[in-house]
Amino acid sequence: MSDNQFYESLDETKPGHTFLDSNELVLNMGPQHPSTHGVLRVILKLDGEKVNGIECVIGYLHRGIEKIAENRTWAGFGPFVDRLDYTAAVSNSLGYCLAVEKLLGVEVPKRAQYLRVILTELARLASHQVWLGTHVLDIGAVTPLFYAFRDRETILSVFEKYCGARLTTHAFRIGGCRWDAYPGFAEEVLKLCDDLPPMIDEYRNLITGNRIWLQRTKNVGYISPEDCMSYSITGPVLRGSGIGWDLRKAQPYSSYEDFEFDIPTGTAGDTFDRYVVRVEEMRQSIRIIRQAVDGLPEGPIIARVPKVIKPPVGEVYVSTEAPKGELGYFLVSDGGPQPYRVRVRPPSFINLQALEKMAKGSLVADVVAIIGTLDIVLGEVDR
Amino acid sequence: MIKSFLGYLHSGVTPGEAGNLIWITIYVLLVFAGVSLGVMFMNWFERKIMAHMQVRMGPMRVGPHGLLQPIADALKLIIKEDLMPSNADKLVFWFAPVCVVMTAFCAFIVVPFGRTHTITDMNIGVVFMLGVSSLGVLGVIMAGWASNSHYSLMGSLRSGAQMVSYEVAMSMAVVSAVMMTSMVTGTGTLSMIGIVQAQMQQHIWFVFSFFPVGLIALAVFAIAMVAETNRAPFDLPEAESELVAGFMTEYSGFRWSLFFLAEYTSMMAVSSIATTLWLGGWLRPFPNLLGGRNWDLAFSLVPGLTFMALALLCFFTFTRMPRIRAMRGDTAGLGGLACLLGVLGVVMLLPGVRDRVQDIFWFTSKVAFFMYFYVWGRTTFPRYRFDQLMTIGWKVLLPISIGVVILTALIGVRQDLFALVRR
Amino acid sequence: MSFVAVLKKIFLIDLVEGLFVTFRHQHPDNLVTEQYPQERPVISDRFRGQPHLKKDANGKTLCTACGACALACPEKLIKVSSLRDPETKKKVLTEFDFDLGRCMFCGLCEEACSSNALELSPAYELALYSREGLELDRQRMEDGTPRKAYER
C-alpha cells in the first residue's frame, strides 16, 4: 500500500482505518539510521516494546540501473553491475558475464573460469566480513567491526592489485577475464588463506561463545523452512533454516564442480544459526580458493568475442550464488548492440520480505538484529 | 585567622570534622577540579584505549597523540547552538542535566582519598553516597520527559528502571561489606574512613576476607555498578543503533556535555565506593605482610617512580615523532609534557612530599583500575536486550547478593560465637 | 550440563576469553591505521585513477584520434576532435575533452585505445573546490595531476 494509504489507515476518522488498538505506537526507523544498513525505512507498529507489524519503505537508493542498461552497450553495462551489491562487486560481475555468455553461446576458457572462482570467493569473504562487522555492531559489540574490516583490507588490496579498484572492480569481461593474475598473485592469495582462519577463530572467542551474544541471537528471528520456500528466500537465510540448497552445488557454473567444499546448514532457523552458517561459509570459501589457486591451469584468459557484442534474439535467465543469496539476471536481447531488457533478481530484495514474518511478536531491539541477519544491501534492494 | 588556617594543617582529621570552613572550601574546589580533570582525562583515555583495542590509533591530530582532544571537544560543545525542542517543558528541560551533575558531584563529599584528605567524614558515609546516586535517576527521568519525544521518553524510562533495579543489588553488596567491618572489633561503621580503618585493623582487604565471599560481593557490586551507570554491556538506553541516544537525544552542546560529565563522575563515584569497601581505599598493597620501615620506604617511592616511568614513556614517544615541519608544535608539546612529568616524579620522590602523596596515589590508581575495566568491558561486550537486563538484575544479581549478605552474617555470627566461647 | 560447563558459566569464562582477545590487540604492532597524509597508501600498477594521455620520447602525442575510447565509454564523456593532415592523410589530434566529474573509472576507454595512449594513471587525489576544474582539456589530460604535498 502507498504511503498515503498507510497513514490513512492510522486515522480513526477515515473509512480505511485498520487499527482497533489505540495503544499502538508507530515508530519510524527512518532512512537515516545507524542500523538499517543503508537507506531503508522501517515503520514499526509497537505495543509497548512488542512489535505488532512492520512495513518497509524502500526506494531511497533507486538509481534506475535496469533502465540505464537499455541505453548502454552489453559490454558498457559491465561497470554498472558492480554497483548493485557493492560489498561484493565481483560476484555481480560474474553473474552478468555468465548470462551474456550464455546468450552468445561463448565458452569461457578454463583458466578464466578458475580465476573467476578465486575472485568471486574472495568477494564472498569480503561481503561476509562486512556483514559480520555490521551485524555485531548493531547488537552492541563495537570491536569485531574493526577486526572484520582489517581482514577485509587484505582482500581489497588483492582486488586493487588485480584489477585496479578496491570496490567497483569491473573485474570480468564478456568471454573471460580482462587481466591475468599479477606476479605474486598466488603467493598473496595463499598467504591470505593462511592468515584468515586464525582471525575467524578469534571471532569465535569474542562472539560465538559469548553468553550475551547467545542470549541476543538464539530464538530470535525464527523462520521455518516452509516459509522460506514460500517467500523464495535463498542464501544463508535459507540454509540457516535447514535446507541445504546452494547453487554452486545444485547447478554448478564456472567450474565449481571441480572443487570440493561443504554447504554449511543450520537447524533452528534463528539468527544464531544464520551467523554460524555464514562464518562456516567463510571457511569453506578459503577451502575453495586454495584448491583453485593450486589447480590454476594455463591457457588463454578470454574467449574470442566480437568487438561489438550483438547477441541473437532471445532471452536468458542465469543465476549464481552471490554472498547474499541467489542473484539472477534475466536478459532479453533483440539482436541489437544494446540490451532490450535487463532484470536483476536481487537476493536482498526477496529476502527482505521475510522481515515482517521474522520480527512480528519480537521486541524492538530484535528488529535491528533481524535486519542485520538478513544481510541486505540497499544497492541491491533498490537498484 | 592565619593561625586557624595554619593550625588545621597539623590536626589529624578532615576539614569537615575540624569544622574549618576555609579548608573545606579549598578541599571542595580541589576535589571539583580534580574530578573534572579526571573526566577530561577519561575522555582521552577511553578513546585511546578503545581505539587500540580496535586495532586503530584514536585521536592523533589534536595535540601530540590526541592529548588536547578533550579540550577541543569541550570547546566545541560550549560554542554549539543551544536547542530546545518546541513544546518541551522548559524548566524541567533546563533542570535535568543540572540535577544529574549535582548529584554526581555531591557523592564526592565523602570519598576518602586519604585519612585527612576528605572533605568531610560523615558517620553515614556509604548510605549518603548510595542515596545521592539514586537521586540521579530523577534527573534522567526528567530529561526524557522534558524532551517531548517518543524516543527520549522510552529511553529515559528504561534507564530509570535499570538504575533502580541494580541499586538494590548494589546496596545488598554494600551491606555485606559493612557487616565485615564489625567482624573482629565488634563495632561496625558506615563511615567511609571508618571502613578503610577497619580493613587496616583487620589486616586484610575485604575483597580477600573469607575468601570467596568478599570476591563475590565485589563481583556483584562491579556488575551492578556498570549497570547503574548505563555502560556496556548494559547501555541499551544509550544504544546508538536503536534509540539514537535515548534520553539524551534532544540535548545538544553544553547540556549534553553536562550529562557526559555526570556519567563519568558517577562512574568514578561508584568506583570509589568499590575501592573503599573492598580494595582497601588508600592503603598500600600488603601493609602488614610486607610491613616494616624498609617496605614502607619502598612502597612510598612508587608514586614518584610511576610518574618517572610515564615521563620516560612520553620521552620515548617524543623520540619517535615524525620529523616534519608541521609536527614541530606537537613534538615540542610532547617534550614539554615529558619534562613536566619528570619534574613531578622527582618532586614526589622527595621525603616530605612522598608521605603525603602516598594515600591519594594509591586510591586514585585503584579507581583508575576500575575505570580501565569500564572501558575494556565497553569495547568487548555486546549489549543486553532490556528484558534480559532486568532479568539479570532481579533474578540473578539480587539472589546472589542476598546470599552473600546471609553468608557474611553467618560467618560473623560464627566469629562472635567463637570469640564468646574463647572468653 | 557437565560440571565443567557449569563452572565456566559461573565464572564467566566466555566473557573473560573475549576480554583477553581485545586486550591482546592493544599491542602497537597490531595497529593498522595509516596516518594519511604523512603515510600514503602504496598504489598498485593497475590502479584505475585519473586518465592520462601519454606522449612518446619526443613529446609527440601517441593518440591517433581514432575515437575508439569515445565509442567505448559507457557515459559518453570523451570528445575527440581531429584534423586530417593533408600530407600523411592521417588524423591528427586537436582537442581531447574528458569530463572527469562523470567518469566512473571503469577502464573501458583504456582497453579500447588502439595506440596505447590513454592510460588510467595512479593519481587518486583529485578533489577540487569547484566543478569547473573537472572538465579536462587536452593539456590537462597530458599533464596529469601532480601529487599534492600536504603541510599537515
Image (cartoon, rainbow, N blue to C red):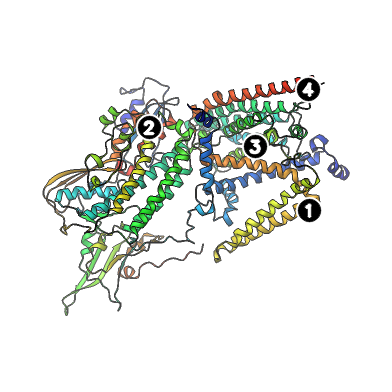
Residue identified by numbered label 2: A43
Residue B254 falls left or right of residue A83: right
Query: Which kind of residue does numbered mark 2 sit on?
Result: Ile
- Residues tagged by mark 4 and mark 2 found on one chain of the structure: no
Residue located farthest toward the right when viewing the structure as drawn:
B3
Q: Quadrant of residue A372?
A: top left
For mark 3, name the chain: B
Q: Select label 3 or label 2 by which is in front.
A: 3
Image disc number at residue A309: none
For mark 1, name the chain: B
Residue identified by numbered label 3: B271
Image disc number at residue B350: 1
**Answer yes or no: do the residues labelled 4 and 3 have beta carbons within 8 Å?**
no
Residue identified by numbered label 4: B419
Label 1 vs 4, first from the N-terminus: 1
Mark-to-mark CA distance, 3 and 2: 41 Å
- Residues tagged by mark 3 and mark 2 found on one chain of the structure: no
Where residue B423 appears, as percent x and y from the top left, is 82, 21
Mark-to-mark CA distance, 1 and 4: 45 Å
